[in-house]
Amino acid sequence: MAIPIPFQLGGSVAVIVLMVGMAALLGFRTTARIADQEALQRRAAEAEPDTRVVESLIAADGKGALARLGDGRILLARSMGDDVTLRFLKPDAVQVQIEGDRLKATFGDIGFPALHMRLKDKTPPAWVAQLAGGQGG
Amino acid sequence: MIRDAAPAPPFDIPDIVTLAIPAFVLLILIEMIYIRVTGRGRYEARDSAGSLLMGFGNQVMGLLLGGVVVAAYYFVYQFRLVTLPWTWWSLALCFFGEDLAYYWFHRIAHERRWFWASHIIHHSSQHYNLTTALRQTWSAVPSLSFAFWLPLLWIGFPPLMVLMFSSISLVYQFWIHTETVGRMGPFEWVMNTPSHHRVHHATNPKYLDANYAGVLIIWDRLFGTFVREDEAEKPRYGVISNLGTFNPFRVATHEWIAIARDVASAKSLREVLGYMFGPPGWSPDGSRKTSASIKAAWAARRAQPVAAE
């Protein structure tokens, strides 16, 4: 006998809630943090072995980072659960906005929405200010 | 020539996928507890939620559009070469035929961006556990991926027989999405296994474009796409450009939107076709990464002599 569609969908939702709840209860809820430039370098080299991080700006909570690479490209890093996701971009492909201690980096990728970071320091490094078009000092 | 109706199956075909769901749930819970206890494997609640929501969306899309596939199957079946009966030998042939069709669908889904835009969803988790198996596309029907099975209908396999083996293949492929099962000895010679499928989900250059099997690994061995899991090289899961979002709508549509943007910027018909049907990562000037360029760069690095200190 076929199960009515509302029961099928309701059953699926209940199962999703059960399994995600179980995963959380079991402690599978960790957040990756980018501790420092060395950690960022390791992540970048995993994705692109010859990559060299020259300068970096890491969010106060370690959940995001922006870096300038040896070949002139920009690296965006974002904590995704217990993983970190990266994007390697040409500088002109990234729009950086700074407001106080907040930084927002956007580029045209629906699979990697704008990166929002709270900065440790209200005065960003010169290379970031340059990316932002001179904003932020 | 239009023929009469398909022969009726001699038994009631159960809804195989629905029947398997309680087992799916139970196995996921067991895997979570096993990983918690042993540390062998990884789970992350938000990632699992994302995978399960993609599976839910796939279920909704199936309810909305599944009829299109059935209609296409019956349409093509009208023009069949022969009428194959429900006998042991036709069932055996259909099993192999369906698995071969799956192999080619799956291979093309990795090699051509149009189909990859739909299939990328299944690969978009950086985790590899049983919830990853349920991370399914929402755009299978609009991408016309069912076309890979139409030759079976044209030959003369009854539509219900083909659908039955597709369901069996889907259920079989659930359990191979795990890091908790190691190598399986002679079973691996013929069958697709967790080890073989870990290789398929890996982004390490060594493992790219390999092990497209559904149930039987023999097709990869036959067509030269088989790669054995190397104990010395742990698979890294995901896609070349991993997603920076858990939003299921972004997950489901990001590659389609990327195609649309690329096509909008194309300067010639060649570029339009390249962006739509070229290998994932194709670009007119070759500036983006494709599987082939990643593998070539990896091979070149390996071939370099170690620099003197």
Image (tube, coloured by chain):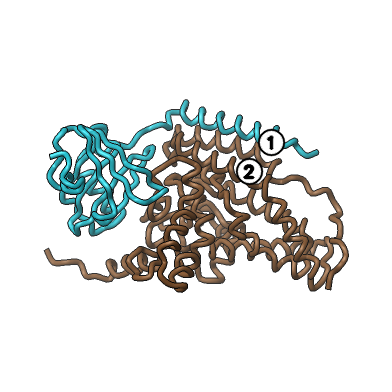
Chain colours: A cyan, B brown
Q: Label 1 near label 2: C-beta < 8 Å? A: yes
Secondary-structure class at tag 2: helix
Position of residue B52 relative to residue A88, above or below, is: above
Query: In the picture, residue A117 is in which quadrant?
Result: top left
Position of residue A137 relative to residue A92, above or below, is: above
Asked whether, in this view, residue A56 is left or right of residue B39, the answer is left
Residue A88 position within the rendered picture, expressed as x and y whole percent measured from the top left: 29, 54
Foreground pick, A108 / B22:
A108
Residue type indicated by callout 2: Gln
Crowding around mark 2 (Cα neighbors within 10 Å: few <14, some 14 to 19, many 20+) is some
Report whether residue B231 is seen. yes
Please, which residue is most extreme toward the top here? Answer: A25
Rendered residue at 16%/33% (across/down): A122
Disc 2 to disc 1, C-alpha distance: 9 Å
Residue B140 position within the rendered picture, expressed as x and y whole percent measured from the top left: 60, 54
Residue A136 position within the rendered picture, expressed as x and y whole percent measured from the top left: 16, 39
Q: Which residue was labeled with disc 2?
A: B59
Rendered residue at 49%/55% (across/down): B256
Position of residue A33 relative to residue B300, above or below, is: above
Residue B287 position within the rendered picture, expressed as x and y whole percent measured from the top left: 32, 66
Residue type indicated by callout 1: Gln
Foreground pick, A57 / A126:
A126
Rendered residue at 51%/28% (across/down): A21
